[in-house]
Image: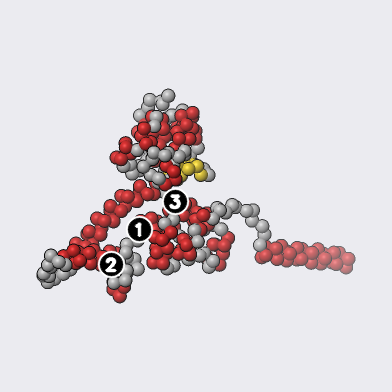
Amino acid sequence: MVTRLRYSDRVAGFTKLFGTIIHSTVWQEALHVKVVWITLLAMCGRRGVVEASIPGLAKAAGVSMAECQDALARLTSPDPFSRTEEHEGRRIEKIPGGWLILNYLKYRNRVDEDAQRIATAERVRKHRSKVTRPVTVTDGNAEKRQAEAEAEAEAEADPEYSPSKKKARTCVYSPEFLSFWAAYPKKKAKWDAFKAWKKESPPLDRCLISLEAQVLTESWTKDDGQFIPHPATWIRDHRWEDELPTKKPRGPNDFEILQAAAEKERAEERQAARAKQEEEW
């Protein structure tokens, strides 16, 4: 039985909630499942990660431990009737320290795409306002001129845009790729990386989780990141599928070993000098 409390008092935070949720299969679940699902959405960070324990989640949602465990079991199980075919309809996945909302970034970027379309329309308007002389447009080429104006405005918004590349670069980077690019430590060959991104279509959530672990590895940190692969290579090789590295106990390096040996040698020399002085006395 769900504890009858005001969930607005228990669940803090903000997330993008689409009205279409009432038509989803999760909305047909029992009340405690829906409450735990909304609580997970409210608790997650920008990458869809929820850091919590089962007792903590149950307390935040205002449900019993048994109801929380049942809800998590349903949300991690395949749903053959889900509108989203990715992950076999699963909503969440267990990760160390909590859960990952599998399609969080997809829905978060929907609003970002709308904002991008509005910004593009505004750039087109500003671009048109730069025209100082009237241009006669016939019905036959009106659609072509409209497409050219929009492409040119989008090209000017490209971070790598320059007037000499006006004809070559007319594509706007996708929000998912820009999230990956912001997290990747080596900013090299952005256009090449974007082409690889479009071809391979990697899962953004997996990429970000893998990068968080890989940037801490010795091969990526030594020599100022000299051995970090180019982002396009990382994408083409599906490096997000690599096993996440585990922390190993750090042993002494060569400098520390030499330093210890030198200190030992100096101690032995001091001891020998004292012994010789005592013999002379």
The front one of 102 and 78 is 78
- Dot 3 corresponds to which residue? 205
Q: Does residue 237 appear to the left or right of 140 in the view shown?
A: right
**Residue at x 55% of width, y 53% of height:** 244
Residue 139: numbered disc: none
Dot 2, how many residues are within 10 Å of its Cα: few (below 14), some (14-19), or many (20+)?
A: many
Figure colour scheme:
secondary structure
- Dot 2 corresponds to which residue? 156
**Residue at x 41% of width, y 57% of height:** 201
- Check the image and report above or below for 78 versus 210: above
Identify the amino acid type marked 2: Glu
Identify the amino acid type marked 3: Asp
Q: Earlier in the sequence, mark 1 or mark 2?
A: 2
Instruction: Name the quadrant containing residue 184.
Output: bottom left
Q: Earlier in the sequence, mark 3 or mark 2?
A: 2
Q: Earlier in the sequence, mark 1 or mark 3?
A: 1
